[in-house]
Image (cartoon, grey):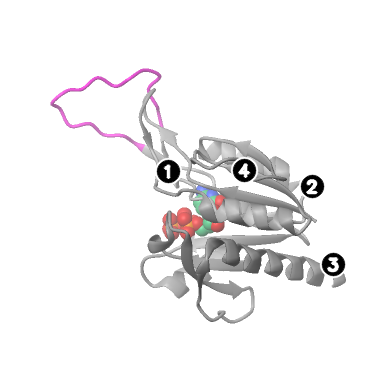
Amino acid sequence: MKMLVTAGPTREFFDSVRFISNPSTGKMGFAIALAAAHRGHEVILIAGPVALDDPPGVQTIRVVTAQEMFDASSAAFQGAHAAIMTAAVCDYRPVAPMNKKLAKSDQPKQVTLEATDDICANLGSQKGDRVVIGFAMEDHDHQAHAQAKLLRKQCDAIVLNGPRNVGAERAEVEILQAGGVWSAPISDTKAHIAIVVVELVERLVAEKSRS
Ligand code: CTP
C-alpha cells in the first residue's frame, strides 16, 4: 500500500532570517513512516525542518513552509491509499514577508498574519475511498476538540495528542474512529504507537476496499 505521512513543523518567514514556527520535532511522523516501511508499505514522508535523518526505505521530501507542505502533500496523495497527518502545520503566515532582514528599532512592530491552507482538510475533502488520519494537538477540552476536527477535516480517525508528547520518546494518545468510540488511552513509545497507527490504517484501507 502507498502511504503519505506529514511530519514536523513548518516555518513562516516574516523577514529574510526570522520566522514563526513551533517546537514539533517530527519524531511521531518519522516513527510512523519507518513502521510503515518495515511493514512493506511504500511511504512518502513530507517533513518540515527537523533534525532527524531520512528513515531507511522511505522517500523523504523536505519542505519548509505550510504552502510547500500543502503542494507536496497534494501531489503525493494522488497515488496514495492513505495519508497520516502528524505535522504541526503553522495555521498563519505573515501576509507580506520582507525580503531582507528587519532592522532593530525601539518602536513596536506589528506583523499581519493570514491563514494557511488546511492540508488535512483538503485531502479529507477529496479522499474518495482513501483513508485520512489526523492528529489533534489539544491542551483543553481534548476529546470534544479532537472529535470536531475529525468531522471538520473528514478524517477516518483522529489521534488525540498533547503538548507533553512534543519532543518526547514516549507519548500518551487516544484514538477516535469516524462513527466509533474512543480507544482506551495508549501510553507507550512513539515506535510502538506508530505500529498501532499503521495497523489501523491497514485495517481501514482493507475495510474500504471491501465495501
Ligand atoms: N493540519 C494540516 N494543515 C493545517 C493545519 C493542521 O494538515 N494547516 C493537520 C495536522 O497535521 C493534524 C490536524 O490537521 O493532523 C489537526 O491539527 P491541529 O494543529 O491539532 O489543529 P488545527 O486544525 O490547527 O486547529 P487548532 O489550531 O484550532 O487546534
- The answer to which image quadrant residue 137 occupies is bottom left
Report the residue that reaches farthest toward the right.
Answer: 210
Q: Which residues are magenta?
A: 95-112
Above or below for 117 versus 177: above
CB at disc 1 and ligand 1 closer than 8 Å? no
Q: Which mark is residue 46?
A: 4
Please identify the dominant SS of the magenta region. Answer: loop
The residue under label 2 is 79
Q: Considering only order in the chain, which callout, 4 or 3, is on the residue closer to the N terminus? A: 4
**Badge 3 density bin: few <14, some 14–19, many ≥20, Cα 10 Å:** few
Query: Mark 2 falls on what kind of element?
Result: loop
Whole-percent x, y for residue 140 in the image: 36, 69
The residue under label 3 is 209
Amino acid type, label 1: Tyr
**Badge 2 density bin: few <14, some 14–19, many ≥20, Cα 10 Å:** few
The residue under label 1 is 92
Residue at point 39% right, 61% down?
163
Report the residue that reaches farthest toward the left.
Answer: 106
C-alpha span from label 3 to label 1? 37 Å
Whole-percent x, y for residue 81 in the image: 77, 56
Q: Considering only order in the chain, which callout, 2 or 1, is on the residue closer to the N terminus? A: 2
Asked if the residue at tag 3 contacts the one at tag 2, i.e. Cβ–Cβ closer than 8 Å, the answer is: no
Q: Considering only order in the chain, which callout, 1 or 3, is on the residue closer to the N terminus? A: 1
